[in-house]
Amino acid sequence: MPPVVAPPLFAFENTFVRDLEGLYVRWEGAVAPAPRLVVLNEALAAELGADPEALRSADGVAVLAGSVAPEGAETVAQGYAGHQFGGYSPRLGDGRALLLGEVHDTAGRRRDIHLKGSGRTPFARGGDGKAALGPMLREYVVAEAMHALGIPTTRALAVVATGETIGRDTGMLPGAVLTRVAASHLRVGSFQYAAALPDRTVLRRLADHAVDRHHPDARDADAPYLALLERVAAVQADLIARWMLVGFIHGVMNTDNMTISGETIDYGPCAFMEAYDPATVFSSIDHGGRYAYGNQPGIAQWDLARLAEALLPLLAEEAGDDVDAAVARATDVLERYPALYERAWADGMRAKLGLDAPDEALASDLLSLLQEQAIDWTSWFRALAADLRGDRDAARGLATDIVAADAWLARWRAHEPDADAMDAVNPIYIPRNQILEEVLDAATAGDEAPLHELLAVLAQPFTERPGLDRYAAPAAPGARPHRTFCGT
């Protein structure tokens, strides 16, 4: 019996399915027994040219739950491989997710509509294919926070409670499906998967698809596939620098979680650093600190090396079938990555400090100061602007060694920083870990009011507003170390 098709909600195209046979399995979502819309991103729906009221209808919620295929969709589970914590898995894929298709938003950008938690697929690897409400709301909240911070990211259109309970290590939890919107879901792991297939044409088709979709200027280069590697390295250097500047820790930077587009994807055990420490880790499964805050730039370079390996057959063709020359060219790209990252980070730090010109020693000494005194990363930069406006206790009050703080502050003030420019790039509100957990616990228990209040706060991260002090406050001294979980 063919699946029931809902009325048109989106004007779908399906270029991934058209172009990339061999990288997906056609599949349908599981039927949710009692779907209920928990949160809908109406602003994003409008960007996608969708009618929020139609999405709120029973038919719309059925689509967002994965129970019904919308008109025009060709639902598929995507295949990809990946290095997970350094170990290679040749077959990962969408074990609990489906790509519905692509739409052009009101700005003309092509964007994927994707379901997460919609049931087992052939890539499920023994999992139940479901998702719990709390982790799906975490992705919704943190993705929207990142978007408001100006960081390239996938976004969440909706979270629907399915009406069922699912078992996790922490007990039985309400199930949910998240609708994710992305520039695409192409990732380093997609190329690793394609490179291992017997059909050698798949890798070329994937590379051509990625160039056309994300980096079309690479098509005009003398070596388009090498140019693709260069473009991905550039967007990832910029992305990771942006993470570092706001204290974001992804938590699971496996190669299947590095996008070709340069968007942040997969908000699993993620969190924002509070007290500055490069060794900060929140993920309960990152026992060795592989994906600690300070390791993120280097891990991105490592992941890019895996992309280069996957692209090597195409790079060799561009080098006249000279593998050694292809390796040398790819190595050159990888060796230039740290400079790209450092430039992006230095430019961002200069803006955070309100400076017209970089001062590497000032920035380096600041990091030492913050680490030695365990100063809250986000609070410090907002306090600096307050210091410039006359509140001399704002920043020094965060320090434990006042003499050292005063010495650094005097050096910094000598540059005549711009307080207003600083406030435009330094957030006052981020998803503070303790508050986020409280909100998710409340929503899981059925109280969604704190969720909507937090989303409203995070939508304007740079604008201080009365009555919201608790959303800007770091964890109390001596608070239990925060831990995050991947949700599967």
Image (cartoon, grey):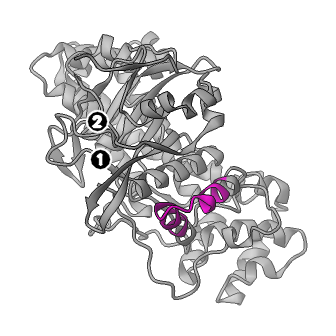
Q: Quadrant of the N terminus?
A: top left
Towards the viewer: 469 or 453: 453
Based on the picture, tell me whether residue 443 belongs to the magenta stretch: yes
Q: Which residues are magenta?
A: 436-455
The Cα–Cα distance between marks 2 and 1, rounded to whole angstroms, is 9 Å
Q: Nearer the viewer, mark 2 or mark 1?
A: 2
Q: Residue at x 54, y 77 (%)?
A: 371
In this rendering, the answer to whether 301 lies above or below 368 is above
Given contact means CB atoms under 8 Å apart, are the residues at marks 2 and 1 in contact?
yes
Question: Which amino acid type is shown beneath numbered disc 1?
Answer: Lys
Taking the spot 58% from the left edge, 67% from the top edge, the residue there is 432
- Classify 168 as above or below 44: below
Q: Is residue 89 left or right of residue 208?
A: left
* Res 3 → quadrant: top left
**In which image quadrant can residue 401 be found?**
bottom right
Instruction: Mark yes or no: residue 76 visible.
Output: yes
Of the 4 image quadrants, the one containing the C terminus is bottom left
**Mark carried by residue 30:** 2
Residue at position x 66%, y 74% from top? Answer: 473
Disc assigned to residue 130: 1
Q: Regarding mark 2 in the picture, which secondary structure is present there?
A: loop
Residue at image position (14%, 47%) is 126
- Residue 29: where, in percent of width, then height? 30, 32
**Which amino acid type is marked by label 2?**
Ala
Secondary structure beneath label 1: loop
Crowding near the residue tagged with mark 2, few <14, some 14–19, many ≥20 C-alpha atoms within 10 Å: some
**Disc number placed over residue 342 in the picture, else none:** none
Q: Is residue 358 visible?
A: no
Residue 213 in the image: x percent, y percent? Answer: 45, 18
Residue 95 x, y percent position in the rendering: 24, 40
Q: Residues within 10 Å of mark 1 (few under 14, many from 20)?
A: many
**77 horizontally vs 215: left or right:** left
